[in-house]
Image (tube, rainbow, N blue to C red):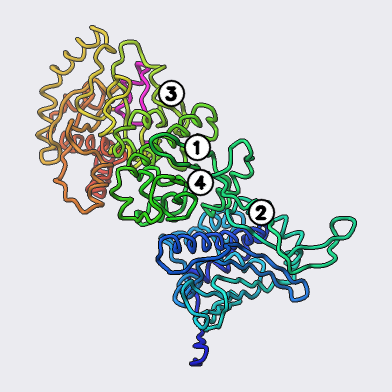
Amino acid sequence: MSSATQRETRGFQTEVKQLLRLMIHSLYSNREIFLRELISNASDACDKRRFEAVAGASGDTPADLFIQVRCDKEAKTLTVTDTGIGMTRQDVVEHLGTIAKSGTADFLSKLSGDQQKDSQLIGQFGVGFYSAFTVADRVEVFTRHAGAVATQGVHWESDGSGEFTVENAELSEVGTQVVLHLKDDALDFSDSWRLRSLIKRYSDHIGFAIKMPKQSTADDGKSEVAVTEELETINSAQALWTRSRNELKDEDYVEFYKHVSHDFAAPISWSHNKVEGKREYTTLLYLPGRAPFDLWSRDAVRGLKLYVKRVFILDDAEQFLPMYLRFVKGVVDSSDLPLNVSRELLQSDSEIEAMRAGIARKVLEMLARLAKEETDKYAVFWKEFGQVIKEGIAEDTANRERIAKLLRFASTHTEREEQDQSLDDYLARQKSGQKQIFYVIADTWNTARQSPHLERLRAKGIEVLLLTDRVDEWMMSYLGEYEGKTFQDVSRADLDLGDLLTAEEKAADEKGTEAALALCGRLREALSGRVDAVRSTQRLADSPACLVLNADEYGAQMRKLMEATGQKLPEKRPTLEINATHPLLQRLEGLADEDQFKELASLLLDQAILAEGGQLAEPAEFVKRLNRLLFAKA
């Protein structure tokens, strides 16, 4: 390694190699987006340099901040230059040699080799700088950090195959220059008219001037005659959120979303608002069309881009959104916050709390409007983000009612697995005299809809919500009631149908309970150590028995969640409820052979466990017991 240039060769991070190989092939049909990605990076660099100057962190006062795009047909190059913050040697190695993003391994594991599917995933991940290799067989980066002297510039180079080189370079200007040596099949990107068209399409909203050399043209207005050294601005160079909604098209909003999110797909919806009064700020909020791969990672980058008086402050200001709205993308621009606002101040400032509450309400209003007016789009949103929205029931008590209206469930009203029924839909169909909203929790939709706990309710035409998401039991513990109706888990021992039963049905239930007392006692003795209690029930119609939970007992979902966090829970002994009118129970009642009685009693309990999707503690013993009974019958 030369002491003069300190040149060194390094290998890409393994994940980068995988991404480059797949990306170059998967994004072939849409590779023009590389220009948008490079210009977005350049815009971020300009934002950061302006902020550093305002905050006084760098001692650097930038002159005109802009982005320049040049092409050279003879040299087969395309160059994107910015006057932004620049990078140090360490920055170059870290940012251009690794993917510093949580969940990288999980993301790469989902890549299948199917170009269409992989293209969507890669776009979801955000390819950024690496998209340059879709059109270039060699990329060079020349960069000098703000505040660094000319001799502290850096030159980075790679062909994207596995290694890159880094060396010192003397650079007269602060900023970054990316030089793409174009592939033979990508030479159309050395045409200035093509580049101008792409800049107008993808990057017109960028708040910094994007300049290209001015051209004189022939009479037809298209043929290139000469390129001058004079630069002209190609884009509108005005921050999109500062413009009036009336002058913006849907295409403008969509392209700006792709800029702030690095997502290839269009958003489902957006909301552009200016708040005036006691506090003044502008928000541009987006609902993505699909969940990011790291949605469930607590360390994932989230939040809005924060600007103060149009000066960029933070890239991921998570303080402006509650955790359950972490999927929202966009911008907040405040007129009241100080320009040197820090993350620490954002954590404690009462002004931020007020803005956070206002922004959360705006997102919920956007969702409510989408649910009411564009049900198909809301169905897509719910499929991607429904479980996250459910977290809000526990986390945001102030908006609990608003969030509850957004919830969607599967139910016994339809034979569809889709969660497309609202609580208002349920209430509109409820039976006369019904005071509760009934639901059942299970691991899968099939297990839920076939649950024996539903038999009596189904026979009476009472609708039951089918809850299968891993957060459902936790959510329902906070929901409490809706529109004056309490929620009732039909698998709980305290199930009360109240006025939904006739006087005759109630009398028959009481009579059946008394008649089964002796059988319940005998079963409890036979199953000693395996059950907490045995009692007769009228909730069953076709099944011989089921398991129920006491009112204060954790269900299977909550036990799994708590055990996953390392909490030790006491061993649970279930309560067995029996249908005394079922032929199997009637046979048991008249069975004198105690050994056979115990065999059948154990089989009855095992069946009840399996019917609710549970796991047997001793499956081998269950098989042996069943075989013994089958052999005895034969």
Up-down: is 610 above or below 164?
A: above
Along the viewing direction, whichever of 381 and 206 lies nearer the viewer? 206
In the rendered image, residue 584, in percent from the top left (x then y), is placed at 25, 27
- Compute the Cα span from label 2 to label 4: 29 Å
Question: For the point 57% across and 78% down, which residue is it?
Answer: 172
**Does the stretch in magenta take in 450?**
yes
Residue that mark 1 sits on: 273
**Quick check: marks 3 and 4 in contact, CB under 8 Å?**
no
In the rendered image, residue 497, in percent from the top left (x then y), is placed at 26, 17
**Quick check: marks 1 and 4 in contact, CB under 8 Å?**
no
Q: Say which of marks 2 and 4 sits in front.
A: 2
In this rendering, position of residue 37 left or right of residue 214 = left
Q: Say which of marks 1 and 4 sits in front.
A: 1
Q: Which residues are magenta?
A: 447-465
Q: Name the residue type under label 4.
A: Arg
In this rendering, position of residue 110 left or right of residue 537 = right
Q: Name the residue type under label 1.
A: Asn
Residue 290, label in figure? 4
Along the viewing direction, whichever of 473 and 413 lies nearer the viewer? 473
Along the viewing direction, whichever of 346 and 108 lies nearer the viewer? 346
Dot 4, crowdedness within 10 Å: few (<14), some or many (≥20)? some
In the rendered image, residue 33, in percent from the top left (x then y), is placed at 63, 58
Dot 3, crowdedness within 10 Å: few (<14), some or many (≥20)? some
Dot 2, crowdedness within 10 Å: few (<14), some or many (≥20)? many
